[in-house]
């Protein structure tokens, strides 16, 4: 292998340097080629891994950060707190449906949030003297992060090489994903499909014994592994009802789809698309747009039910991370969220994002390789197939998703190209722009993507 230019960063591509982001301005980023020093401006339709809410280089955020640097001080979370962590928790609770959440733990990443959520669920049942509840039921083709616990409840190509060091499969049970495009049967309605999947969850609970099942864990709107496939209307309410029936914790992972990315009410939670007041999850992880790429923050929100078990039990949580609830991160994240709310950006991305999705659907409908365009609000995917009628997937080795990402990149727009949505095979690209997206920018994204798909078709010799 020829190493172009030495890198000392042990992440992503080892040894060779990848392009560096040198600046950002609204919906654009500028990257520098490490070899030539050439700089290119890209329309950032994906904001990294769906982190962008406010857009890049926002002078208001820079001001907020300067103030926060002066006004915050480190506090060790095991026995000290800070007002900013409290205020951010209050903001999330007050801007969620009434009674949904009672408390929050602020972490540094989504993986860390999910890792903590598993432990919180475990301790919750110990607080209630139910030690046999140790099993987590989650879904195939899901992603919850890269820590060992998060990988164990996930199931994607990314977990494959680590399988032998994960939690045992007898403890982390997987059911089918909710994947209407491929798995809904001929003649089945959306509702019947949803019911069939709920029945599968119930069969697993009955087979394993409700007294051993701790939680059902799903991504509300699945992100990178499955590609933003919305569930049938009855799916999440069905899981909620099952969890109530069998005393199982209902956990939603909203790290990628939450915190304003796809909320129909100008609020924070993606689940509000399907679940009403009193139907929310018992525990929820969040991240990404919470800090909008400016600070490293994610979190776990717990419902009054879980909170009460701890208050009435030991009153303490086992485990503290040195940087949990970090005052600077919490203060900046809070100000960012207040600004998103003030500027009504959640409403904007829901409206303009849906316009983006509609345009992608329309303009890509004549492509011979775009089988399905799906999503909600500011979170969309296009699945790429070899045959639109049979939905046959491309050979994995062709790397169709990642290649389309590269072509889009060279044409001036960022998207995320993924593989493995259909049991390890299948390709899709994703879109998650900043909440400031305008109709003109949406049109520009669509135009470049349509052109890029045509180039890909040509290179695959499909047309
Ligand atoms: C649904 C979901 N959960 C968890 C994570 C992990 O978050 P992080 O990369 O911040 O650790 C991700 C990251 O993409 C995600 O999409």
Image (cartoon, rainbow, N blue to C red):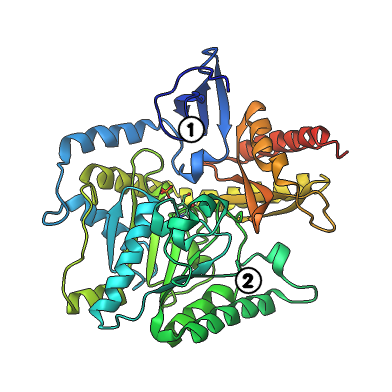
Residue on which disc 2 sits: 232
Q: Which mark is residue 26?
A: 1
Task: Examine the rendered structure and indicate whether residue 188 appears above or below residue 7.
Answer: below
Q: Nearer the viewer, residue 121 or 312?
A: 121
Q: Is residue 226 left or right of residue 187?
A: left
How many residues crowd around disc 1 within 10 Å: few (fewer than 14), some, or many (20 or more)? some
Mark 2 surroundings within 10 Å by alpha-carbon count, few (fewer than 14), some (14 through 19), many (20 or more): some
Mark 2–mark 1 distance (CA, rounded to whole Å):
35 Å
Quarter of the image that includes the C terminus? top right
The residue lying at 56 percent from left, 20 percent from top is 40
Asked if residue 392 is positioned above or below residue 206 in the image, the reply reads: above
- Between 100 and 453, the one lying in front of the other is 453
Sequence-first tag of 2 and 1: 1
Q: Is residue 121 above or below residue 87?
A: below
- Residue 442: image tag: none
Q: Is residue 74 above or below residue 175?
A: above
Q: Position of residue 165 (x, y in %)?
A: 43, 56
Q: Position of residue 101 (x, y in %)?
A: 33, 68
Q: Nearer the viewer, residue 247 or 43?
A: 247
Residue 422 in sight here = yes
Q: Is residue 368 left or right of residue 51?
A: right
How many marks the image carries: the answer is: 2
Nearer to me, 23 or 147: 147
Q: Which quadrant holds residue 94?
A: bottom left
**Residue at image x 49%, y 23%?**
17
* CB at disc 1 and ligand 1 closer than 8 Å: no
Q: Secondary structure at mark 2?
A: loop
């Amino acid at each position: 292998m020829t190493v172009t230019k030495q890198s000392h960063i042990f992440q992503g591509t080892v040894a060779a340097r990848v392009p560096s982001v040198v600046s950002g301005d609204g919906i654009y980023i500028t990257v520098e080629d490490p070899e030539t020093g050439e700089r290119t401006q890209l329309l950032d339709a994906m904001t990294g891994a769906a982190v962008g809410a406010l857009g890049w280089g926002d002078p208001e955020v820079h001001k907020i950060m300067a103030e926060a640097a002066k006004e915050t001080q480190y506090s060790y979370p095991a026995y000290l707190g800070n007002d900013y962590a409290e205020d951010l928790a209050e903001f999330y609770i007050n801007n969620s449906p009434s009674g949904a959440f009672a408390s929050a733990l602020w972490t540094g990443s989504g993986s860390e949030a999910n890792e903590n959520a598993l432990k919180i669920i475990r301790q919750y049942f110990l607080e209630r003297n139910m030690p046999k509840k140790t099993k987590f039921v989650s879904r195939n083709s899901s992603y919850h992060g890269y820590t060992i616990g998060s990988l164990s409840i996930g199931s994607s190509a990314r977990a494959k090489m680590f399988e032998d060091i994960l939690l045992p499969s007898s403890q982390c049970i997987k059911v089918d994903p909710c994947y209407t495009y491929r798995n809904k049967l001929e003649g089945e309605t959306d509702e019947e499909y949803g019911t069939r999947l709920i029945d599968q969850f119930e069969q697993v609970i009955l087979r394993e014994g409700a007294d051993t099942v701790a939680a059902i864990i799903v991504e509300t709107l699945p992100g990178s592994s499955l590609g933003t496939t919305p569930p049938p209307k009855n799916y999440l309410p069905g899981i909620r009802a099952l969890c109530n029936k069998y005393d199982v914790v209902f956990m939603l992972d909203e790290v990628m789809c939450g915190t304003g990315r796809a909320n129909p009410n100008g609020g924070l939670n993606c689940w509000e698309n399907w679940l009403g007041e009193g139907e929310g999850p018992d525990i929820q992880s969040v991240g990404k747009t919470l800090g909008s790429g400016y600070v490293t923050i994610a979190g776990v929100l717990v419902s009054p039910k879980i909170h009460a078990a701890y208050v009435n039990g030991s009153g303490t949580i086992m485990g503290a991370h040195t940087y949990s609830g970090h005052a600077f991160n919490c203060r900046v994240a809070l100000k960012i969220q207040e600004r998103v709310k003030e500027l009504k950006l959640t409403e904007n991305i829901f409206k303009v994002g849906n316009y983006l999705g509609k345009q992608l659907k329309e303009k890509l409908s004549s492509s011979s390789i775009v089988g399905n365009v799906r999503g909600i609000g500011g979170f969309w995917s296009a699945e790429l197939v070899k045959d639109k009628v049979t939905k046959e997937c491309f050979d994995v080795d062709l790397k169709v998703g990642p290649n389309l990402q590269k072509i889009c990149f060279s044409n001036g727009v960022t998207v995320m190209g993924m593989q493995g949505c259909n049991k390890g095979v299948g390709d899709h690209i994703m879109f998650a722009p900043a909440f400031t997206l305008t109709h003109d920018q949406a049109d520009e994204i669509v135009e470049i993507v349509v052109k890029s798909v045509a180039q890909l078709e040509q290179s695959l010799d499909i047309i």
